[in-house]
Amino acid sequence: MQEEILLQKITEIVHECGAILLSADDIKRKTHQKEGKGNFVTDYDSRIQEILEKRLLELVPGAAFLGEEGQMDHTDISRGYAFIVDPIDGTANFTRGYNTSCISVALALDGYPILGVVYNPYQIETFHAIKGKGAFLNGERIYTSDRTLVEGLILFGTAPYHAELTRKSFEIAYQYMSRAQDLRRSGSAALDLCMIASGRAEFYFELELCPWDYAAGALIVEEAGGLTGDLQGHPLTYGRKQTVTARAPRVELLEL
């Protein structure tokens, strides 16, 4: 299927799932604790992932499917097509009515994203990218900013499910913040990556993320002219947990 047509169909499915978020009710009763501090899943996460798995695999039969509410260790995305999906990125926000959550879908080929969609239904913002064809917000081309770190806005995630990373996360955030203009913490890695892609912020990091948190967003950053990698600038991989950074081109990584 032609990439643009596939993108259109994926976007339609994601928008339908976004309507489920907007109409959600009685969320507290439908929220369950997972392993790890502040790690929640709702009935809506499971429902949306089931819809995405069924509908997306109808578009690309035979593709692998890697979703947050599944088993990463048993899904091989290294060969052929694979969907990498977060049904609700920012679940803790969702459970509190904080309205900073999104649906993230990436299609990978041989282990690397070639198409990504991130939809924030609360702001009615759809970010998308196709490998080699640029990044877009609601159909308009977007680019990372031309600001340097000293002019920059820093975004970070606190890796809340991993208490051993808390102090290090804030130490790194302080190092960047002390050289930058200001700092933000949203609770959604996918949306933070899209903020870098759209030039609204200049640097983002989190010390441990799963592929569904960053696969679509990282592609969108790269197609907007930004840079992704780990804290040393090594390229991202998408079959395991890892540290993720994203930045505008004029922002240099610090030697920590």
Image (spheres, rainbow, N blue to C red):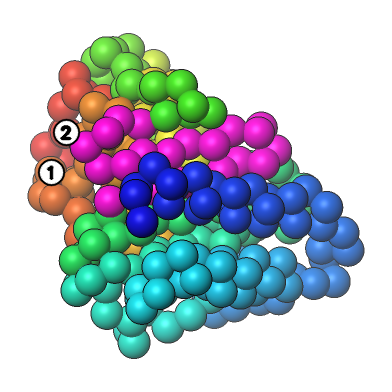
Give the CA separation, mark 2 to mark 1. Answer: 7 Å
Q: Position of residue 243 (x, y in %)?
A: 27, 55
Q: Position of residue 225 (x, y in %)?
A: 24, 27
The numbered mark, 2 or 1, whose residue comes first in the sequence reads 1
Which residue is pictured at 27% across the width and 13% down the height? Answer: 146
What segment is highlighted magenta in the picture? 114-135
Asked if residue 126 is among those painted magenta in the image, a careful observer would answer yes
Q: Nearer the viewer, residue 200 or 150?
A: 200
What secondary structure is found at the residue carrying circle 2?
A: loop
Check the image and name the residue furthest to the bottom. 74
Check the image and name the residue furthest to the front. 1
Query: Do labels 2 and 1 touch, CB within 8 Å?
Result: yes
Q: Which residue is identified by label 2? A: 253
Q: Which residue is identified by label 1? A: 233
The secondary structure that most of the magenta stretch takes on is strand
The quadrant the C terminus occupies is: top left
